[in-house]
Structures are given as C-alpha cells and as structure tokens.
Image: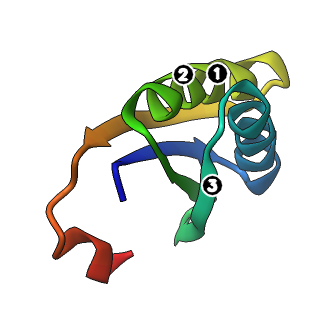
C-alpha cells in the first residue's frame, strides 16, 4: 500500500458521492467503507501518493455539491505496515 486516503461524511449518500468522485478523478482502489455511527461514514481508498491526493481533493468537494456534509479528509502517504492490519 503506497498511500491511504480517507474521506468522512455525514450520510451514506454523501459518502457514495465522494467515492464516485474519487474513483473518477484518479486511479485508486476502494479499501473499505466504514459506518462509524450517528450517520458518519468513512470511505478509505489506496493507490500511489499523487493519485490518492487527487482523489481525496475530488472527494472533499463532492458531498457539498449534493447537500451532504464533509466531516474530515486525510491522506496518509507511505503508511506503516501495521496500519494495514487495522483496515
């Protein structure tokens, strides 16, 4: 895993919209879609660092375009090997 990108939204619809934008913007792969609770959903993708950065940038914009709410977004370049065990 070269890089991990995370986008957290409030609502599943906003998360799916973010995921769609992320996959269309760059060559990334869906790792997981986690439902945290209280309507929070986190989309996790991986790929090379530049692709993940581009995908997260696109994913941050998508929920606001459809009336959703962006909670947080982050890119972790070159994550530690033990981090992949959590995902």
Q: Position of residue 66 (x, y in %)?
A: 85, 25
- Mark 3 vs mark 1: which is more N-terminal? 3
Q: Are marks 2 and 1 in contact (CB under 8 Å)?
A: yes
Residue at horizontal 54 percent and vertical 22 percent from the top: 54
| Mark number, residue 29 | 3
Helix, strand or loop at label 3? It is strand
3D distance between C-alphas at marks 3 and 1: 14 Å
Q: Position of residue 19 (x, y in %)?
A: 72, 44
Crowd rating for badge 3 (residues with CA inside 10 Å; few <14, some 14–19, many 20+): some
Instruction: Depth check: give the residue in front, 30 or 61.
Output: 30
> Residue 32, relative to residue 19: is it above or below?
below
Q: Are marks 3 and 2 in contact (CB under 8 Å)?
A: no
Residue at horizontal 52 percent and vertical 45 percent from the top: 8
Crowd rating for badge 2 (residues with CA inside 10 Å; few <14, some 14–19, many 20+): some
3D distance between C-alphas at marks 2 and 1: 6 Å
Q: Position of residue 30 (x, y in %)?
A: 63, 59
Which quarter of the picture shows residue 58? Answer: top right
| Mark number, residue 58 | 1
Q: Nearer the viewer, mark 2 or mark 1?
A: 2
> Residue 81, relative to residue 55: is it above or below?
below
> Residue 85, relative to residue 43: is it above or below?
below
Residue at the disc numbered 2: 54
Quadrant in the picture for the N terminus: bottom left
| Mark number, residue 27 | none
Helix, strand or loop at label 2? It is helix
- Left or right, 17 with respect to 69, comes to right
């Amino acid at each position: 895993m070269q890089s991990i990108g995370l986008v957290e939204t409030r609502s599943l619809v906003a998360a799916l919209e973010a995921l769609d934008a992320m996959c269309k913007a760059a060559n990334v792969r869906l790792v997981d879609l986690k439902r945290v609770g209280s309507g929070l959903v986190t989309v996790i993708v991986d790929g090379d660092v530049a692709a993940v950065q581009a995908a997260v940038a696109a994913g941050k914009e998508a929920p606001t375009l459809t009336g959703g709410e962006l909670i947080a977004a982050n890119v972790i370049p070159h994550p530690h090997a033990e981090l992949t065990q959590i995902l």
